[in-house]
Image (cartoon, coloured by chain):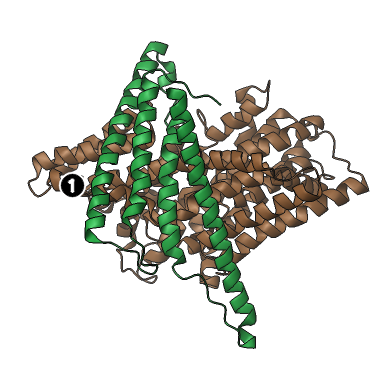
Chain colours: A brown, B green
């Protein structure tokens, strides 16, 4: 290992120290990226710091003026507007009208509503917090065990990161230079599998221990009718975004734009004809929340761009892929190790930051293990070409990143739900999450063993 | 003084948000045109989509995205790993937070300087968008303002300014 690689590794170590010292993630990436490049320039004469700094004249603006990334604030805005227009509540009540009569049906409804809201929101934390606020009081009213209700909601919240359209999918696709639409298509079936698995977990748990969900929900015919009626426009809005993206009617930015427009029209329409819906105050709140969240995401994206430049100059990604190639480990074992690293990092790191820091290292390793950029499906280790590998690895990565959100000791989703559920001990919520964690592991193994599940829709619709 | 800065930064972010709403409206018109074109094509009627739509989105989103940075700083929304520092004594946590705020102020000021230079250079090069043929350099200016505001907010936080609301 040469001097440059050692500086790169030291930079990585400094990054983790700064992160542990609560330096904002974007700032830490930026500081290590610039500082590291300065140190590299002292060692290697071909790296010149002066010209390097001049790129900042246009780098930040160029990063922001990116059409592909314009989808981020629009999806974020869509989620906040949906929340302000009470679409999350309509979704939950509609699902409850469909499934509430079964034992454990309200918890199952919460999972369905999380999946639906995740589709429009694209963020796991926002999904968990929004659906937690809507569903927890209802679950509490029916005396659901706090372990089941908080566990189901914390796990259900993770669906936001994978069910398309998702901000994390967009960012992953941008990093590996893959197709955003193919990523969206690929995420649909694994997302649905998660919904089915989570609902099955609830069904099994309440069958084994009926006291977890002692009563079923009873709705009058009128209440059910109204709940289903309010569900229809929500399904039309959310469904048309997913369907439009899936069949290639829209690209992501128009899809997000149309989604926001539809929610604005529907929300103001409701307001016009009734007491609820979207108010101008609500729109203002959604805009300010969008500004706060998007500013955070864009700063991390910019920091990651600068950091990536430093790591590339230090030859770290290529050194790492060479090491993995020469290690003699089975490629699937290397893949499993990488996924486990994601789960561990996910215990304390923000999911976007993790994707931005780690994927640029792991992706070249995957390409090398697979047989290089030009490997064909017949000759490749993983039985697929580089384009398909991007999609498959991306879906696996996002699932394990999700897992970090419900893994002790941090598990951000668990913290959010626990904060909403007053008087429920944290350990109780972590216990509630465990069965869902278990089926997530099964899902990862299933998708690793049968990549065709991930690749089915991209191949069918591509 | 800090509360005035707070109002300016909030208004600046709101303007960025409104720019995002304009993108939404332009997108709706563009998709509407596509849909009409698809529906009316069999009748021999062609409805053109908005020319230079992507150019517009690219420029507008650059201004919107950068306008959010100071507001995120104001609301302490730039994500950080909270796990380990929580165990430190309060005074040490405060020192660390102030240190990062000073660093943010310096970095943001440097970015404002570089963006200003970039704006002058882009103006000198007469860089234009591909389809609309709009000059790119004026779109750097909101970015310069955003970076300057970001630096001031971080500095204000170091000097004890608190965010309200």
Quarter of the image where the N terminus of chain B is located:
top left
Dot 1: few (<14), some (14–19), or many (≥20) neighbours within 10 Å? some
Q: Quadrant of the C terminus of chain B?
A: top right
Residue A136 lies, in percent from the top left, at: 72, 33
Examine the rendered structure and indicate whether residue A322 appears above or below residue B12. below
Position of B56 with respect to A116 (left or right) is: left
**Quadrant housing residue A126:** top right
- Secondary element under disc 1, as helix, strand or loop, is helix
Whether residue B79 is visible: no
**Which residue is at the front of the view, B110 or A351?**
B110
The residue at which mark 1 appears reads as A52
In the image, residue B73 lies at what x, y percent?
43, 32
Residue B126 is left or right of residue A214, and the answer is left
**Foreground pick, B20 / A127:** B20
Q: Is residue A361 left or right of residue A148?
A: left
Task: Provide residue A388's location: percent of width, then percent of height.
Answer: 43, 64
Q: Is residue B131 left or right of residue B16?
A: left
Parent chain of label 1 = A
Which one is in front, A392 or A418? A418
Number of on-image labels: 1
Which sits in the foreground, A447 or A186? A186
Furthest-left residue in this view? A45
Corner quadrant of residue A107: top right
User: What residue lies at 51% left-to-right and 60% top-to-bottom?
Assistant: A252
The residue positioned 22% from the left and 60% from the top of the image is: B125
Q: Is residue A131 visible?
A: yes
Residue A233: x %, y % from top left: 74, 56
């Amino acid at each position: 290992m040469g001097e440059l690689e050692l500086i790169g590794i030291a930079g990585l170590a400094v990054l983790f120290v700064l992160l542990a010292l609560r330096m904002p993630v974007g700032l830490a990436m930026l500081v290590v990226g610039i500082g590291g490049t300065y140190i590299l320039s002292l060692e290697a004469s071909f790296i010149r710091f002066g010209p390097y700094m001049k790129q900042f004249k246009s780098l930040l603006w160029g990063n922001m003026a990116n059409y592909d990334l314009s989808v981020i604030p629009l999806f974020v805005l869509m989620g906040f507007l949906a929340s302000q227009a009470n679409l999350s509540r309509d979704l939950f009540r509609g699902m409850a009208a469909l499934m509430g009569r079964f034992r454990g049906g309200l918890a199952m409804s919460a999972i369905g509503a999380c999946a639906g809201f995740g589709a429009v929101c694209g963020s796991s934390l926002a999904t968990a917090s929004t659906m937690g606020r809507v569903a927890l009081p209802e679950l509490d009213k029916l005396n659901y065990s706090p372990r089941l209700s908080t566990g189901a909601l914390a796990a259900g919240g993770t669906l936001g990161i994978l069910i398309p359209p998702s901000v994390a999918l967009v960012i992953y696709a941008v990093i590996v230079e893959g197709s955003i639409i193919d990523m969206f298509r690929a995420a649909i079936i694994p997302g649905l599998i998660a919904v089915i698995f989570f609902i099955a977990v609830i069904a099994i748990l309440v069958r084994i221990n009926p006291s977890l969900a002692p009563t079923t929900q009873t709705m009058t015919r009128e209440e059910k009718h109204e709940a289903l009626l309010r569900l229809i426009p929500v399904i039309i809005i959310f469904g048309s975004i997913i369907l439009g993206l899936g069949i290639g009617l829209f690209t992501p930015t128009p899809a997000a734009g149309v989604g926001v427009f539809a929610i604005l029209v529907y929300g103001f329409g409701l307001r016009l004809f009734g007491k609820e819906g979207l108010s101008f105050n609500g729109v203002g709140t959604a805009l300010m929340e969008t500004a706060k969240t998007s500013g955070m995401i864009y700063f991390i994206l910019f920091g990651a761009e600068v950091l990536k430049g430093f790591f590339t100059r230090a030859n770290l990604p290529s050194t790492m892929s060479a090491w993995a190639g020469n290690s003699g480990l089975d490629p699937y074992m290397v893949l499993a190790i990488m996924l486990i690293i994601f789960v561990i990092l996910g215990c304390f790191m923000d999911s976007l930051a993790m994707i931005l820091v780690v994927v640029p290292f792991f992706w070249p390793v995957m390409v090398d293990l697979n047989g290089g950029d030009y490997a064909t499906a017949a000759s490749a280790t993983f039985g697929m070409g580089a384009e398909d590998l991007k999609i498959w690895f991306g879906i696996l990565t996002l699932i394990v990143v999700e897992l970090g959100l419900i893994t002790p000791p941090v598990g951000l989703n668990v913290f959010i739900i626990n904060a909403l559920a007053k008087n429920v001990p944290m350990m109780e919520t972590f216990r509630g999450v465990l069965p869902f964690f278990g089926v997530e592991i099964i899902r990862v193994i299933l998708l690793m063993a049968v990549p065709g599940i991930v690749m089915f829709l991209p191949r069918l619709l591509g | 003084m800090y509360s005035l800065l707070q109002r300016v930064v909030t208004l600046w972010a709101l303007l960025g948000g409104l720019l995002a709403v304009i993108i939404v409206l332009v997108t709706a018109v563009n998709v509407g045109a596509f849909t009409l074109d698809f529906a009316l094509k069999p009748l021999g009627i062609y409805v053109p989509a908005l020319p230079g739509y992507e150019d517009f989105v690219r420029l507008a989103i650059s201004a919107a995205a950068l306008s959010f940075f100071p507001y995120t700083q104001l609301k302490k929304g730039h994500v950080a790993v909270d796990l380990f520092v929580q165990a430190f004594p309060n005074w040490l946590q405060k020192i660390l937070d102030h240190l990062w705020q000073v660093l943010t102020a310096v970095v943001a000021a440097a970015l404002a300087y570089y963006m200003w230079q970039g704006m002058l250079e882009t103006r000198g090069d007469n860089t234009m968008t591909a389809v609309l043929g709009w000059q790119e350099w004026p779109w750097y200016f909101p970015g310069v303002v955003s970076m300057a505001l970001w630096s001031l907010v971080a500095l204000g936080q170091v000097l004890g300014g608190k965010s309200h609301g």
